[in-house]
Amino acid sequence: MTTEQHRATTTGTSPTSQDMAEDLAQAIITRGWNAPATLLLELMRPLAFVGSQLLLVIEPLAGPSAQGRSMRHYAEWLQDRRNVDLLLQRIETHSQGAAVDAAALEEDACRSLR
């Protein structure tokens, strides 16, 4: 069993879901949207289906999405609450990693000033 298959069986999501969560989390962290995105996702968790339908409504206005996936693909993906939870996990993991990196950079900068 490959790592992807193992991950899919243990989390109940497909490797595609894993990839989408990773891609979205990376895009959110890169843009510095981790706090607003986490807040929005936590608030919309009970309404994930409604939010996914909203994405379908704005699809014609938004154009192509990240990684060449269409807004429709993300809307379908967000209909499952497990995917919202998975995305929140990924954002938290990447945020913690970014905080550790920032602390290390700050420490290095302080050392160089001494």
Image (cartoon, helix red, strand yellow):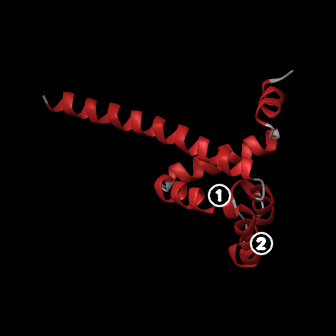
- Which of marks 2 and 1 precedes in the sequence? 1
Question: Furthest residue to the front?
Answer: 46
Quarter placement of the N terminus:
top right
For label 2, the SS is helix
Quarter placement of the C terminus:
top left
Quadrant for residue 42, please give it.
bottom right
Task: Check disc 2 and give the amino acid type.
Answer: Leu
Residue 49 falls left or right of residue 111? right
Quadrant for residue 68, please give it.
bottom right
- Residue located at (20% from left, 27% from top): 111
Which dot marks residue 84?
Answer: none
Tell me: residue 51, above or below residue 30: below
The CA distance from mark 1 to mark 2 is: 17 Å
- Residue located at (78% from left, 30% from top): 10
* Mark 1: few/some/many CA within 10 Å (<14, 14-19, 20+): many
Task: Check disc 1 and give the amino acid type.
Answer: Arg
Image spot of residue 73 (x, y percent): 80, 59
Image spot of residue 30 (x, y percent): 51, 50
For label 1, the SS is helix
Q: Which residue lies under the disc numbered 2? A: 56
Q: Nearer the viewer, residue 21 or 61?
A: 21
Disc number lying in front (1 or 2) = 1
* Mark 2: few/some/many CA within 10 Å (<14, 14-19, 20+): some
Image spot of residue 24 (x, y percent): 64, 51
Q: Which residue lies under the disc numbered 1? A: 45
Question: Furthest residue to the top?
Answer: 1
Q: Nearer the viewer, residue 91 or 49?
A: 49
Tell me: residue 3, above or below residue 99: above
- Residue located at (76% from left, 35% from top): 11
Q: Nearer the viewer, residue 48 or 29?
A: 48
Image spot of residue 28 (x, y percent): 55, 53
